[in-house]
Image (cartoon, grey):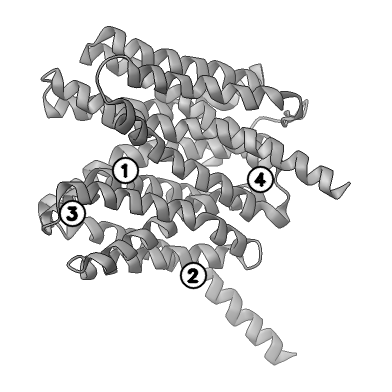
Amino acid sequence: MSCDRSTHLWRRASAITACATVFTAMQGLTYPLLALVLHRMAVPEWLIGVNAAAMPSGMVLSAPLAPRLMRRWGGYALTLISLVASAASLLALNALQDAWLWMPLRLLMGLGLGCILVVNESWINEIASDDRRGRLIGLYSAVLSAGFALGPGILTIVGSRGWAPFLVGAALPLLALLPLAAVRRELPRPSPGERAVSVFAFLRMAPLLLVLTAVVALADEGAMSFLPLFALAHGYAEQTGTVLLVVMIAGSVGLQYPIGWLADRAARRAVMAGCAAAASLSAVLMALAVDVPVLFGATVFLWGGVYYAMYMLALVRLGESFSGTALVAGNAAFAAMWGMGGIAGSAVVGGAMSALGPFGFPLVFAVAFGLIAVVLACPVAVRRRAAVRGRADG
């Protein structure tokens, strides 16, 4: 019986994860693909940047809409509509070939991807039992991180010209429908009569988790845009910068399950504090080891794993603390903060590098994650001292 329950759990988890991976795969494909196409259209760099910001802006807009639509239509129907809309938007981009018309289409795509993320991250937390939540969400996060590499991989195979990359990209959300349809009757459903929790109300419930999400998104966007430039400024070849992105993503894939396993066996806030401290320290080590290729690659791998684990651990804490409509509102707030962090990422990291030179790149992350580590560690230290005093008094 236990084996049957476990099989049932992993079957649903696999379908949910496959669907949610569309979120990262579409980002990994569209950002480089559309930048290349716009460049060939002789669109100025500032407009390329504004164009790219439309997708995370759509994610921010999805935050107040997704919980309402999920209550009205149900999670499965909302996901189905969002997947089809994302595929149609991508095909329409190649059909129109106009930078200004692309912005509402990319906004719509971001809206659809944001809804997919809200629904699927609510589902994965709903089906996870607390004793294995870290491992389950660790695997979920690892696969999502691998999705970022899928997009550039498609471009490597089919190129960036013609209909081929758009057709392959549009097939991804449609293929994700197949495993999801197979488990549609087993997916979590909202409890009838449960009082709705608004996204804006949730902002007061877990502010630290929301700040964590925004900082991880900022790091993600900043690294994807500027890690190759940081390497280039220190004499590495352009191709090496791309390889370093692969190394970073490999870290974010490889370390999620071990950190999730640890979160199931230790105090989760302490694990989060440790990851934040490791993200800050490894950012410092990136600056110190940049002239030693092997050490530089190792620190990039470690940094990619521990900074991305902060988002995974935030999801674990969210599912541990909330359920039902509060969990949906929390995931919607996470999507909004991810969008805001993504919008800010290039501006913050690029501004730091403009003001301070190449070392502005690791400095932003060292400071941001260092502050988070201090905030997370303080309550842990206070509780530990109280426990020691209690034992002494006893």
- Rendered position, 383 above or below 328: below
Give the mark toward the camera: 2 or 3.
Answer: 3
Q: Which of marks 3 and 1 is nearer the N terminus?
A: 1
Q: Which of marks 3 and 4 is nearer the N terminus?
A: 3
Q: Which of marks 1 and 4 is nearer the N terminus?
A: 1
Instruction: Estimate the x, y position of residue 49 in percent, counting from the top left.
Output: 21, 30
Q: Which residue lies furthest to the right in this view?
A: 1
User: In the shown orientation, is residue 288 left or right of residue 365?
Assistant: left
Q: Which residue lies furthest to the front in this view?
A: 157
How far is mark 1 from mark 2, CA to CA? 26 Å
Of the 4 image quadrants, the one containing the C terminus is: bottom right
Give the mark toward the camera: 1 or 4.
Answer: 1
> Which amino acid, mark 2?
Ala
Q: Element type at marker 4?
A: loop
Asked whether the residues under the numbered discs 3 and 4 touch, taking CB atoms below 8 Å apart as contact, a structural biologist would say no
> Which amino acid, mark 3?
Phe
> Label 3: how many residues lie within 10 Å, few (<14), some (14-19) or many (20+)?
many
- Rendered position, 202 above or below 305: above
Q: Earlier in the sequence, mark 2 or mark 3?
A: 3
How far is mark 3 from mark 1, CA to CA? 14 Å
> Which amino acid, mark 1?
Glu
How far is mark 2 from mark 4, CA to CA? 22 Å
Instruction: From the image, tell me which residue sits under label 3.
Output: 230
Q: Element type at marker 3?
A: helix
Give the mark toward the camera: 1 or 2.
Answer: 1
> Label 1: how many residues lie within 10 Å, few (<14), some (14-19) or many (20+)?
many
Q: Residue 322 carries which label?
A: 4
Q: Earlier in the sequence, mark 1 or mark 2?
A: 1
How far is mark 3 from mark 4, CA to CA? 40 Å
Q: Element type at marker 1?
A: helix
Q: Residue 377 carries which label?
A: 2
